[in-house]
Image (cartoon, rainbow, N blue to C red):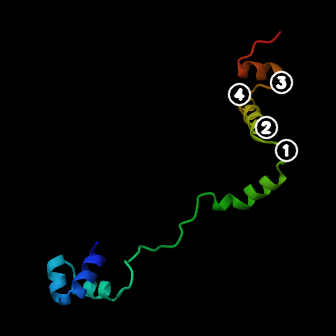
Amino acid sequence: MEWAQVRALVVDGVSKREIARRLGINRRTVARLARSVEPPRYRRAPAGSQLDLFEPVLRRLLEEWPADQGAAGDRGVARRVRLRRLGRSGEAAAARASGSHGA
């Protein structure tokens, strides 16, 4: 890491010009690294999410969703959605989708 190398060479009394020559970096970079107390960090603003536009709607839906439905209820909902997309409804379609053979 350049920062640690620069700091060590500065403590050893090596000139900033010589440090720049040895490490192959600009003298201004050496000066900046010598001044800093901690290693430089890359900082940028959070980019956000593609779901940010839908967050209010998703939060409202989560508040309205019945709290007693757990993972099993979610699977039932997913199955009903799949059946609707296939154009089927009713118990016979559910039996066909699950693969059970009832009378």
What whole-number distance in Å separates the C-alpha atoms at marks 2 and 1? 9 Å
Q: In the image, which disc is placed on residue 73? A: 2
Crowding near the residue tagged with mark 4, few <14, some 14–19, many ≥20 C-alpha atoms within 10 Å: few
| Residue 3 position within the rendered picture, expressed as x and y whole percent measured from the top left | 30, 78
* Marks 1 and 3, the one that precedes in the sequence: 1
Q: Is residue 4 left or right of residue 94?
A: left
The nearer-to-camera label among 2 and 4 is 2
Q: Which residue is mark 4?
A: 86
Crowding near the residue tagged with mark 1, few <14, some 14–19, many ≥20 C-alpha atoms within 10 Å: few
Q: Secondary structure at mark 2?
A: helix
Q: Are marks 1 and 3 in contact (CB under 8 Å)?
A: no
The nearer-to-camera label among 3 and 2 is 2
What whole-number distance in Å separates the C-alpha atoms at marks 2 and 4? 20 Å
Q: Which residue is mark 1?
A: 68
Q: Which residue is mark 3?
A: 90
* Marks 2 and 1, the one that precedes in the sequence: 1
The nearer-to-camera label among 1 and 3 is 1
Q: Are marks 2 and 4 in contact (CB under 8 Å)?
A: no
Res 97 quadrant in image: top right
Res 73 quadrant in image: top right
Q: Amino acid at mark 1?
A: Asp
* Marks 3 and 2, the one that precedes in the sequence: 2
Q: Secondary structure at mark 1?
A: loop
What whole-number distance in Å separates the C-alpha atoms at marks 4 and 1? 28 Å
Q: Is residue 61 left or right of residue 20?
A: right
| Residue 52 position within the rendered picture, expressed as x and y whole percent measured from the top left | 64, 62
